[in-house]
Every structure is written in C-alpha cells, then in structure tokens.
Image (cartoon, rainbow, N blue to C red):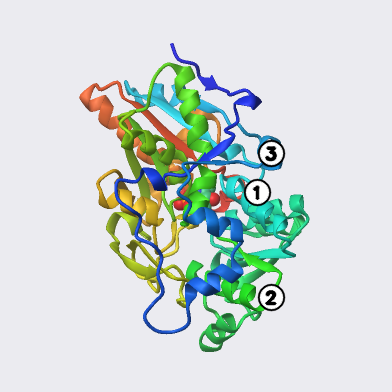
C-alpha cells in the first residue's frame, strides 16, 4: 500500500534544474524581432537579468542551483510533500489513485517563489538596485516582493487594476514584504497615461502591465525586468517541482499515468511536467499530460500557433507560441492567473507535437469551484482558484476511471492555496 504522505529529506532537494531544450524532438523556434521598429531583442538584453537571458537559450541539460539558493529553497519549505488523496478517492468511488503536489505550502501561497528567488538572486549578483514586474492575479507580485526583501533589493509591481481593486489583503501582504505596488494602467508610465487618457476607468490587462514594467525598466537604469511565467528560464527554475515528484513516485512504488496542471502561461504546468516529459522523450517512461484551462483564455487549447508579441504594446520580441492575439480581450474570472494571451514556447512546441492534451472549463467557474469545495471537504486544504482547475480535471479523469474500472495513477500540481482569494469562492458558490 502506498503512503498517504511522501516526504523527501532535505538533502534530497534537487541540486540542478532540468533544462529540456537539448531533449526537444525539434529545435525550439527562436524569439525574433518584428520587421519594423527598434530591436526588441536588443532592448530585452538591456533590461533583463543577464544570467536569466543566458539560461533562456542554454543547451546544458542540467543547470546547477547555486548553494545560497538551495538554502533559500529549504527555508521556503522545499522539498514539498506529495500527498495521496485517499478521502477524495473514496468520495468519488474511483479505482484511480490520486496524488497532489503541495506547492500550496509556499510562504506566499504559490509555486512562483521557485523562480522569484532565482531571478532575484541573479539580479543581486549582477549588482542591480531592484527589479520591476507585472502581476495579474497578484501571486507573482507577492512572490517577487518576498524574494526582493530576502535579497535586499527593491521591487516595483504593476498590478492589473481590476484585480488590484478587490484583492485588498494580498495587496497588504505585498506591501508588508516591501513591494512598491501600482494599479495598472498607472500614471507612472507613458503607456499607462495614454491608456488612462482614453479611458480613466480602464480595468487593465496583463499585457498592459507587462508594457508598463518594460517601460519602467527601460527608463530606470539599475532596475531589471522580471517575468513570472511563459519564458524558458522561468519554466526551468520551476522544474524543482517535477524533479522532486519523480523521486517521490519512486518512493511510493507506483508511477503516474497522467499528470495534470492548470495552465495560464505554463510555468506550474511546465515545472511539474517537464522532467517527466523529458523522460518520455528519452524513452525512459510512459505518461500523459493534461493542461486545464478557462474558456476565458484557452491559449494552448484553441490559440493559433504562430509568432506574436507577449505584451499589449508590442515591446517584447515575437515568440512562436499558441496565442489568442496579444490585444485580445478576455472575460474576467476569479482564477485570474489563468488569464493570459500566450502560452510558453516550449509547451507550445510540445503541444503542436501531440504531447499535451487540454481541457477547458466555463467562464462562470461553478464546476471548478465546486471541485475546490469537494477537495477542501475531503482533503482539508483550500486550493487557489487557479489550482482548482487542476483539481477539477483530476476529478473528471478519476470519474472516467470509475466508468471504465481502470486503476490509473493520476497526479495534479496544487500550484497554490486559496486563503487570500476567498472572495471569489464566496461569489461563485453563493456563500
Ligand atoms: C500564476 C499562477 C498560475 C498560472 O500561471 P502558470 O504560469 O500557468 O503556472 C497558476 N496557479 C497559481 C497559484 C498561480 O499563482
């Protein structure tokens, strides 16, 4: 009988990140400049942290995690447990075995800490005064503010206004970590001012917030621009999740048939799945992969696979990815971290080659949040609104197993906890 809780001792913390680039079946189409205008690639090489940019195109399969960073991962609670959801299995009457990885135990409430610490570490190493960034749901801004105070750097956050307005408690937490937080569009940048001039009540979007962050970094020397998802180096930092999970399944004595994650830009999904996908590509393992999305932003499910900008104003290079169009309007949802126009280029390539299945849930979020409630009532922990998409998808797969009688092993990544986002549950579940 496999364990309910599979812990790794501290000395089993991964010592290297996994970089999938050399193992991809086809070369990843590189970022490129648009045919007109200034060079975005040159601009990015100035505002981004150099080490991160270098990692973005690395051909090294294993990239060592600096020792100080390993210590900070341990301080943040790594390695994190893998849990078997026995009560949920019983409730669903499924023959499937259900597992969940506990990224919800992070200090700021999400997996984003894994890359925030790494990016901040390298920003300090190259002598930056601070960093700036965008945030949608607020999890990334919180994680970066947390990492900035541990590294003694400044952190400026542009936060999509319609989320900034209602997530009062998370805003306070960000400020307690020392973050300088602006509602976006803001008066701090030209991009923000020009949008506010046309519409003073503009609700903002992640694409606009990215444009503001990039403009700020361009004009404030000493500030680096950091991104919390989509890019290759971000996914690589996140692979500590999947690398731990591989060790934990080896302890459990069974191997997963299907790995599930919610999908916004792809960082938690990639961090969880890429180490497994790497083994599939190298012929060492059989496993399927499922990304759970909202109909509000079904980028990797229904987007077009083509070159597009990653931000509203077109300040980034063009990335080959599944995209809904960089100026698309997306209906608001409480799982706001899943609302982004483009999908990670690495995961887009793997999707185009048939390695990733997807599932889309309706914009009203009812079935998804009901799944979060079921999970809370059986396993005791409240998933982040985003994570509840992964929980819902795992439950749906478990119910399929109930029909077919298959004893599959399913695992989902619980990318975060929902304690700071209870408002959304109250609204959707009428509590
Ligand atoms: C940011 C976030 C997501 C979505 O972003 P990805 O890059 O797709 O992982 C999902 N869950 C949580 C808890 C988040 O903070």
How many dots with numbers?
3
Q: Position of residue 35 (x, y in %)?
A: 36, 80
Q: Residue at x 32, y 37 (%)?
A: 281
Labels 3 and 1: the sequence-earlier one = 3
Q: Secondary structure at mark 3?
A: helix
**Of the pair 6 and 174, the residue shown nearer to us:** 6
Give me the C-alpha separation between circle 2 and circle 3: 30 Å
Give me the C-alpha separation between circle 3 and circle 1: 12 Å
Q: Residues within 10 Å of mark 3 (few under 14, many from 20)?
A: few
Q: Residues within 10 Å of mark 1 (few under 14, many from 20)?
A: many
Residue 117 badge: 1
Q: Residue at x 56, y 44 (%)?
A: 111
Give me the C-alpha separation between circle 2 and circle 1: 22 Å
Q: Residue at x 32, y 30 (%)?
A: 398
Q: Secondary structure at mark 2?
A: loop
Please say if the residues under marks 3 and 1 sit with CB atoms less than 8 Å apart.
Answer: no
Q: Position of residue 180 (x, y in %)?
A: 72, 66
The residue pinned by badge 3 equals 67
The residue positioned farthest toward the front in the image shown: 59
Labels 2 and 1: the sequence-earlier one = 1
Q: Position of residue 137 (x, y in %)?
A: 54, 58
């Amino acid at each position: 009988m496999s364990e309910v809780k599979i812990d790794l001792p501290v000395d089993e913390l991964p010592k290297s990140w996994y970089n999938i680039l050399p193992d991809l079946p086809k070369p990843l189409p590189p970022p490129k400049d648009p045919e007109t205008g200034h060079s975005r690639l040159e601009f990015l090489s100035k505002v981004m942290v150099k080490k991160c940019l270098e990692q973005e195109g690395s051909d090294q399969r294993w990239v060592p995690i600096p020792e100080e960073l390993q210590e900070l991962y341990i301080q943040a609670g790594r390695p994190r447990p893998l849990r078997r959801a026995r009560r949920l299995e019983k409730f669903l009457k499924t023959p499937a075995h259900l597992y969940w990885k506990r990224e919800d135990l992070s200090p700021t409430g999400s997996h984003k800490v894994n890359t925030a610490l790494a990016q901040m570490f390298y920003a300090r190493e190259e002598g930056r005064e601070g960093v700036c960034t965008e945030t949608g749901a607020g999890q990334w801004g919180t994680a970066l503010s947390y990492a900035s105070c541990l590294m003694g750097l400044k952190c400026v956050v542009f936060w999509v206004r319609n989320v900034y307005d209602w997530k009062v408690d998370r805003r306070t937490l960000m400020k307690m970590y020392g973050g300088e937080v602006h509602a976006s569009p803001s008066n701090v940048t030209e991009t923000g001012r020009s949008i506010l001039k046309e519409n003073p009540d503009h609700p903002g979007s992640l694409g606009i917030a990215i444009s503001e962050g990039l403009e700020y970094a361009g004009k404030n020397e000493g500030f680096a621009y950091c991104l919390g998802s989509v890019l290759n180096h971000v996914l690589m930092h996140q692979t500590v999740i999947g690398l731990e999970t591989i060790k934990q399944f080896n302890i459990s004595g069974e191997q997963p048939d299907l790995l599930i994650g919610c999908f916004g830009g792809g960082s938690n999904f990639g961090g969880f799945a890429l180490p497994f996908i790497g083994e599939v590509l190298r012929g060492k393992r059989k496993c399927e992969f499922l990304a759970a999305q909202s109909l509000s932003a079904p980028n990797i499910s229904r987007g077009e696979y083509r070159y597009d900008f990653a931000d509203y104003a077109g300040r980034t290079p063009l990335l080959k990815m599944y995209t809904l169009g960089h100026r698309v309007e997306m209906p608001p949802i409480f799982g706001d971290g899943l609302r982004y126009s483009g999908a990670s280029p690495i995961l887009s390539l793997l999707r185009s080659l048939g390695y990733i299945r997807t599932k889309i849930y309706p914009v009203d979020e009812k079935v998804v949040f009901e799944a979060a409630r079921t999970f809370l009532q059986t396993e005791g922990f409240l998933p982040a609104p985003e994570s509840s998409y992964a929980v819902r998808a795992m439950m749906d797969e478990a119910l399929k197993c109930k029909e077919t009688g298959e004893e599959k092993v399913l695992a989902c990544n619980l990318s975060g906890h929902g304690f700071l986002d209870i408002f959304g549950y109250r609204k959707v579940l009428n509590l």
